[in-house]
Amino acid sequence: MKFKLLFLTLFITAVSFSQSKGTIAGVLTDKDTNNQSLPFANVLIKGTNIGTNTDIDGKYAITILPGKYTLQFSFVGYESVEVPVTVVANQTVTLNKTLGSGSYKLEDVVVRSTVHREKETALLLDQKNAVVFKQSIGYQELSRKGVNDVATAVTKTTGISKQEGSGNIFVRGLGDRYNSTTMNGLPIPSNDPEKKNINLEIFSTDILEYISIDKVYSSKLYGDFAGGNVDIVSKDYKGKGFIRVEIGSKINTNSINENNFTLQKGPNGSGFSLASKPANPLTQYNFGSLQLDNKTPFGSSVGISGGKSFNVGTESKLNVFANVAFGNDYTSRSEGSAKGNVNGNGVVFKDFEDYSLISYNTNFTSMANIGYKINNNNKINFNSVFINTSSQSKEEYAGFIVDIANNGNGLIRRNKYERNSLFINQLLGEHKIGERSKLNWGVSYNMIKGDMPDRTQNIFREESAGFVLSSISAPDNHRYFQKLKEDEAAVNISYDYKFNKTEDDSYKGKFTFGYNGRFKARDFEATQYNFKANQGFNGTIVDPNNLDLFYNQENFSNGYFDITTFRGGFQVPNALQPQTYNGDQFINGGFLNTEYKFNKLTTVLGLRGEYIFQKVDWNTQLDPDGGSNELDKIAFLPSVTLKYELNEKQNLRFGFSKTYTLPQFKERALFVYEDVTEVKVGNPNLYASDDYNFDLKWEMFPKSEELISVTAFGKYILNPMNEVTIASSTNDISFINTGDFGYVAGGEIEYRKLLFDFDESNSKKLSAGINASYLYSNQDLSTEKVIRETDYNVVFTNEQSKFTGASDLLLNADISLLNEWNNKESSLNTTLAYTYFSDRVYAIGTNDKGNLVDKSFGSLDFIAKSKLTKRLGIDFVVKNLLDPTINRVQENRSGDVNVLSYKKGLLFSVNLNYQF
């Protein structure tokens, strides 16, 4: 039988060289999932070995000699279908089919349909076939590379880097203000009053299916776009019932080497603690303890997830997925030094030879996804995500502080506890209306609360008898309470209409029109209580590790110190009134896309119109009587996208668009935020920038797991915004339109390759990937413009500068070895992943001071993921193997001054998982 089959296959193949052929082509769809395309299904000519697999869109094509055949369609867990077909020379027979699970058990159906949305090969196929520029990274690739959060995930794609020590990302050298974040296409708010985007580190990869990164604008997106949009696509589970349990542990080498890992008493380990402002704070001492508590710096994690699909009647299906996880970790910076307020001649006003930062961090994540397929034409999804994160830290700076510790005998300690709670709720719908039309819609309501309850700062000077508290300025020793609350509602509606039907039942053209709206309200308040020792007590010896002996009700009653706010003491009627700013922002946008396929060329012409309104009210120490500011803008945003199919494996793409960049609430509010080494203040005169974007890309897909792509891009930005140091007694940093124009130009390359396939069953293979980007950025810096347009005085050191956050070179590389055995129920996947970025500007220099520059470094991670049995798995990860020194320098004309230096240490983690 095998010989006959082989002979028949060879005969057909041999004769095919001398005869004209015909083609069988079509689309395979899934009856159980609203007639969505069915990727990776098998299509076979019965009685031969001639066949193919459907692509990401469910399409297939087989070229064969004329004759009568039987075509077999099959997919794991679905009923196989056989269809007779007659092939005619030089003609294409269109054969579209729908497969259903029929009498098969549901659990057999979904194993494949769940996996394909997360697989690297599926996402590559999606990228290949998409008309728009598309780049995605799925759960499978993130797992292989040991990535646990979204911020790190996006840095594994071309042209994206992350700011060290934060979750802020840079896309093609453009930072937070130029980027946007969505979940399932709907916007999500920021958890940081200074930032436009949410800290992506708080999103665990456990809740996502894949991440889509749009670096080329299309009119479906909001126009506040220049760098990129990160869209987190949540899990949409379809499959048999399962429960997965995970436990893990992690350690940081710096943390376990700390002699005393101590943090301020008060917050508990759950991350849900929340201190409130004390009663009668100016007339009684009702504040929490300043004592320190010893910690055992071993992190841990635990999680449980589950999902199941249910048939409802003959056409409907209910899919449910839920996830709950909690994790904590300890981090420490070692071998640190820092400098603050360095002038252009290198004179240092704060010089700390010993700098350290230790922290305890938590992340609680819960998610529920409910998908209901009403029938083959209608589907709705509900997503709800709750994330609670906390960070408790202690920063210490020891050394020289001008006028306070001139002999290098100063000590600054800042204890900080931050808690952020994000609640996302989304309802999404998809409705097929006839053969030509489809309606998609989504609504969301998101809430975020960001609290910094009772941040404390104390400044000491060490003398022969011990430490004394600084009393030069009232804010030297303070306790700070901050609250942020933001609510945002959003709506997306789009309608697709296909036109110009062809003979093979496909359509050449499509209109897409729709509406996007987002409505945001933010309330922010902050109160700082200053503790200044009175005359006669400002030389009291104190114990930095037991300040409760000095700060207590008895000493307060005896006049050892006073408690005031920026408005004054208890004698001032409104002394307890906090600093506030409130912001409202409304964006209403409509768009029309026209897509048309001219043989191998597909064009998309887009036009978007938006009305933007932003209002900020404030009452702060800079403006105690209060003030307000409004910004409104009407924007018309054209875009063009072209895709030319060079052949089956190669595409050439072009994109051009106009967009804008909005300032953020806090950047335009007259509010002061003080850090240990810098002070930031808002600028009500800040206004939006306009952006022009260009992209040209060539891509080739040699095999299903391989990709080669080269991209050239450029951006021209009118009136760019930057953080700069303004002329003030404390060298404040503000947000300013620093010049008339700026531009970014560069190139990107990506290469994914299957190096070796050691056996025919694909059970052992070696693969590698590399992506790199090079960019050049430059912007005009105009002192005259700043003085003319603002109330601030700035003297730029240079007339031109790179964009802040722009690295000339970004590089990601990885190599993986997969070994499977025991019928692929057991496996070991090991990966080495390397990331590098070159020097990048942190802040632009003024008043003869050079730019602050984050120096280049690379990091290397090792990841081993193993399935011991079908149900039991264990993962082992080592991050930051090279442990490079992180440096920030001020590039003065007289030479570089190192203003920040530290090491992060290595991170070891072990995770055990079991699936029922």
Image (cartoon, grey):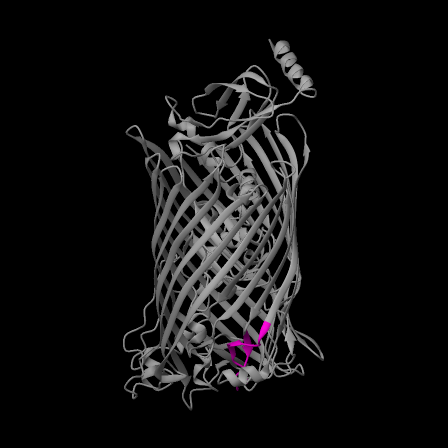
Q: Answer yes or no: is residue 911 visible.
A: yes
* 885 left or right, relative to 460: right
* 302 left or right, relative to 286: right
For the residue pair 767 and 99, the one nearer the viewer reads as 99
Identify the residue at horizontal 42%, vertical 39% (top origin): 245
Give the farthest residue toward the bottom. 535
- Magenta residues (range): 723-741
Residue 521 location, x and y as percent?
34, 66
The image quarter containing residue 693 is bottom right
For the residue pair 461 and 529, the one nearer the viewer reads as 529
The C terminus sits in image quarter: top left
Residue 668 location, x and y as percent?
43, 75
The N terminus sits in image quarter: top right
Q: Answer yes or no: is residue 562 visible.
A: no
For the residue pair 483 and 642, the one nearer the viewer reads as 642
Above or below residue 580? Residue 868 is above
Identify the residue at horizontal 48%, vertical 23% (top origin): 74
